[in-house]
Amino acid sequence: MATTIPSIVCLGVIGRNNNPLHTSIFPSYDPSSNSYHPIRTPLQFSLILSSTLDVFELRSHQNQAAGVGLTGDFGLLHAVDDRLAAYGFETNTGTRFVVIVDMRGRRIDNAVAAGFADGRDKRIAGAAAGLREGEMRPVFKAMQAVYIRLTQNPFYDPDEHSSPLGHGGKKIMSKKFTEDMRRIGENWTPGITNL
């Protein structure tokens, strides 16, 4: 049986008016076919991203009642099932970043597996056991940096991407933004400190 570690299967950016701005979907390891393919359809990922909005609201109200800051790393939002977990971060402008992780999404080869069995690769050994608190911080930091670069573009109009009337808004169509999000999702592994 192949050894698997967590991997990102979806990155989502949600606007301040709860409108989806961007979604990137990544393949996940399927042991039955020994291949990689998306674990859910785009519609299913969209529904999972939408379901995180209630958790963001609830945590915001709890943080406000406790006198804690309203933005930042929300940590684990909810476990979707035995494989998927959603993590969240909210910026001070109300933009939300969601990372959906498949706990068995990436296969590692036998040489790497032997290395962590001997204790030589502590990072992979920890990944095989699950995710620790703060494992998503580098992902959120990288996503925020990419989003900030996008908003610094003089041709990007953030108000065009959020509609207060509930009519949605435009999705982010920047090729550079999409490439950067793809790079983040593909390069993350548990224990990584910089993306």
Image (cartoon, rainbow, N blue to C red):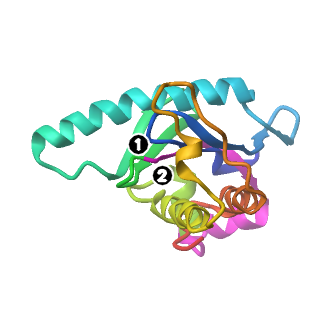
Q: Residue at x 55, y 74 (%)?
A: 194
Q: Secondary structure at mark 1?
A: strand
Measuring from the top left, give residue 3's x and y in whole percent: 70, 50
Give the label, 2 or 1, closer to the camera: 1
State which region is magenta.
95-122
Callout 1, which amino acid? Leu
Whether residue 100 is visible to the viewer of this picture, yes or no, is no
Residue 22 relative to residue 165: left or right: right
Number of callouts in the render?
A: 2
Q: Is residue 102 above or below residue 78?
A: below
Which residue type does callout 2 highlight?
Leu
**Which residue is disc 2 drawn over?**
131
Quadrant containing the C terminus in the rendered view:
bottom right
Q: Residue at x 39, y 46 (%)?
A: 94
- The residue indicated by pointer 1 is 76
**156 to 13, vertically: above or below:** below
Where is residue 89? Give x, y as percent: 42, 50
Q: CA distance from mark 2 to mark 1?
A: 10 Å
Q: Quadrant of residue 22?
A: top right
Residue 149 left/right relative to 89: right
97 falls in the magenta region: yes
x and y percentages locating residue 141 in the rendered image: 49, 65
Whether the magenta-drawn stretch holds residue 144 is answered as no
**Residue 35 occupies quadrant:** top right
Mark sitting earlier along the chain (2/1): 1
Foreground: 63 or 163? 163
